[in-house]
Amino acid sequence: MKKILKNVLLFSALIGSVNCLALPAAAIDVATANTSVMADAADVVYSGTCGAEGDNITWTYNESESTMTFSGTGSMEKYYLYPWDKDGYNDPNVIPEWMNDSRISSYHAKHVVFEEGITEINKINNSFFGDVNSACDVTVPESATSFDATNVSIKLTLYGLDGSWFYGEFGIRENASQEYVSIGTAKNPLYPASGTCTSGATWTFDYRTRELHISGSTMRTDEMPKLPCSKYIFEKDFIPPENKFYEKSDLNTFVMSMTIRSLGEGRKIYCYPNSPFAKEYEKIIATTDDDGSYADSFYCNYLPDDTGICGDVNLDGKVNLLDSVLLAKAVNGSVTVNDMQKKNMDCDGSGEIDIDDVTTLMQFLVHVVDSLPVK
């Protein structure tokens, strides 16, 4: 019995060896070809044209990377969501070409890239990404001068170059569904990062914080750079031009116009205590406080300055009776003060602003105490 079983096993092994050795070359080629097809299928790339002038712009969809890339120069074809949403476009296509391309079984782009050279992207919609997406990222070049994503319902991460047209339109917005991410600085920025005025002042612009820092000698109002800034920061060494708001006035025209201008533009003004700009600004405030007119139209924020003087409540660089009067008003709540003033008001060093600070300041003024804050 054992001998019979042994022969059966040997026979089976022999048949298997023969089958392996006798496998037709064609069958091997078919198997190899199938493997090759599967490998190529994972890296399929489709393409077509979508330019406003025909073939001036090409689209390329890499299925394995879920990436749609637009290359070329000039304007994209104009698309819209529905036939009644034409926005004045002349005979546009309802759906982009790649959505009707029979070669693409399932369009699902997670990344959409518009390459340098494309100018007018115009209106985009969910068809640029595939309706199954919930989020996608879009890269927009420096050359772009139009981009409309109002018809996109998914969350977009917008990659662009600081200083470009696209930065000015989307890099400064606060939009929960569209986040701007910087990928560098434009080679020829529409919004430069620095400059010098004819009058002599210099300025720098921070793309991320949107702060415009102004320093040096004088500057005219018409020399203010037109930038999408949220803050004007006048440095300690900035000197406002010497001109008066009106002939018999002691108010500075430049500082007056900047404070009014910032209110209308929704921008904030910052300066340092005791700086030339701050001193001119405080003259304006003193005038509005006297007659009560336009008091809400003028507002400036003071930046922290380590050279603050304890007891100098009105920030004029001196400690005198005027400071004690202002401190008393601040304690009883009849006037509003800024952070720098609050720092200088803590005359007794307690960390709290109260009537004891008023008493301590008066003692300093009549030489009962020799220094502030009292240790």
Image (cartoon, rainbow, N blue to C red):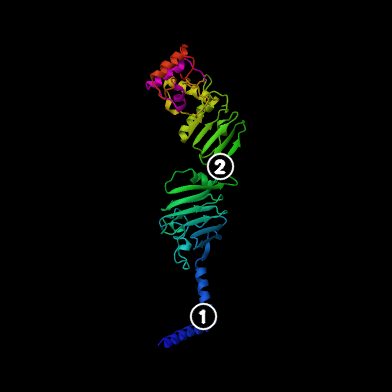
Residue 306, relative to residue 196: is it above or below?
above
Of 30 and 265, nearer the camera is: 30
Q: Amino acid at mark 1?
A: Ala
Q: Residue furthest front?
A: 2
Which residue carries the number 1 mark? 27
Magenta stretch bounds:
317-346
Of circles 2 and 1, which is in front? 1
Query: How many numbered marks, from 0 up?
Result: 2
Quarter of the image where one finds residue 117: bottom right
Which residue carries the number 2 mark? 191
Quarter of the image where one finds residue 85: bottom left
Does the rendering let one see residue 363? yes
Type of secondary structure dominating the magenta stretch: helix
Residue 240, relative to residue 29: is it above or below?
above
Q: Give how far across and how far down residue 31 sits, in percent.
A: 51, 76
Does the rendering let one see residue 245? no
Mark 2 or mark 1, which has the lower sequence index?
1
Q: Is residue 339 part of the magenta span, yes or no?
A: yes
Q: Is residue 223 part of the magenta span, yes or no?
A: no
Q: Give how far across and how far down residue 29 sits, in percent.
A: 54, 78
